[in-house]
Amino acid sequence: MAIAGSSADSAIPPLPAQRIPAWGVTDRDAQRLARLTGLLFLVTFATSIPALLVFYAPALADPDFVLGQGFSRPVAVGAILEMVLITANIGTALTLYPLLRPSHPVLAPAYLSARLVECGLIAVGIIALMALNTLRAGPVADDPGAMRAVGAALVAVHDWTFRIGPGVVVGVGNGLILGWMMWQTRLVPRALSILGLIGGPALLVAGTAVMMGKIEAGSEAQIIATIPEFLWELLLGLWLMVRGVDRAALARLAGRPIPA
């Protein structure tokens, strides 16, 4: 009968250290995924900015918008653009997932989860403004003051989904998590990854300050804090679409010989 800790147990050889296996993504597929990721990042800019600053602007700025006559097509167009934005947001996490999952089995799903949370908040904002549009298209209100109050509440819901989603969650997901994974894997230049590692915390701190009432939403302080994250996502999208990922870094992650 063997006793725990005896020489019989010590004779059992230790299990060899094993590399986390790559998922069999070829170099060509990896570059295609990278370029698709870059395109999707640029799509997020092309949809989110016009939706907020152009198509939603009358509904967000005018307290009497809800008292207008008829369905607002600009608001509907803004909602469609944000639905495309949601698709592109989730797409950036899905296309990067096969490249990052082998080396970051926890952070890669965390990035996807952060994107899903962000998109869930964006979807709530879309519903709020489409509900506002429904009220506007309804019969003339007997109590304009009550309609204004309901309209203001729906706009406030949209505003807070924006402040928490793109204003806070993005700092964690796109900034800290994605920035750290890109820094460690070196799939893109480390100088570029630094923008994410700076922009993420800056956006997170500013967004939290807005939630705590320390600074105003859209204030100069928040705008300045947003700049590094804005540049990180924009330049990352351009780099991935034009250059793809670094072949030497990809080979190291996959355990293949580094190309000359």
Image: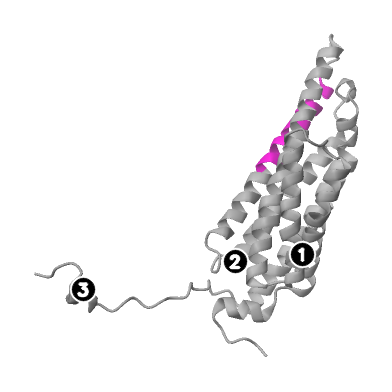
Q: Position of residue 103 (x, y in %)?
A: 55, 69
Quadrant position of residue 187: bottom right
Q: Residue at the bottom extreme?
A: 260
**Amino acid type, mark 3:** Asp
Left or right, 130 with respect to 100, comes to right
Q: Say which residue label 1 marks.
A: 236
Q: Position of residue 73 (x, y in %)?
A: 86, 35
Tell me if residue 137 is in the magenta stretch: yes
Q: Position of residue 14 (x, y in %)?
A: 32, 76
User: Residue at (60%, 63%) from the top-left corner?
Assistant: 97
In the image, residue 99 above or below residue 27: above
Tell me if residue 47 is in the magenta stretch: no
In the image, residue 158 above or below residue 116: above
- Dot 2 or dot 3: first in sequence order is 3
Label 1, label 3: how far apart the Cα atoms are:
52 Å
Q: Say which residue label 2 marks.
A: 100
**Amino acid type, mark 1:** Leu
Q: Residues within 10 Å of mark 1 (few under 14, many from 20)?
A: many
Read off the magenta span. Answer: 120-138
Label 2, label 3: how far apart the Cα atoms are:
38 Å
- Dot 2 or dot 1: first in sequence order is 2
Say what secondary structure mark 1 lies in. helix
Q: Say which residue label 3 marks.
A: 9
Between 226 and 260, the one nearer to me in the picture: 226
User: Residue at (64%, 57%) from the top-left corner?
Assistant: 177
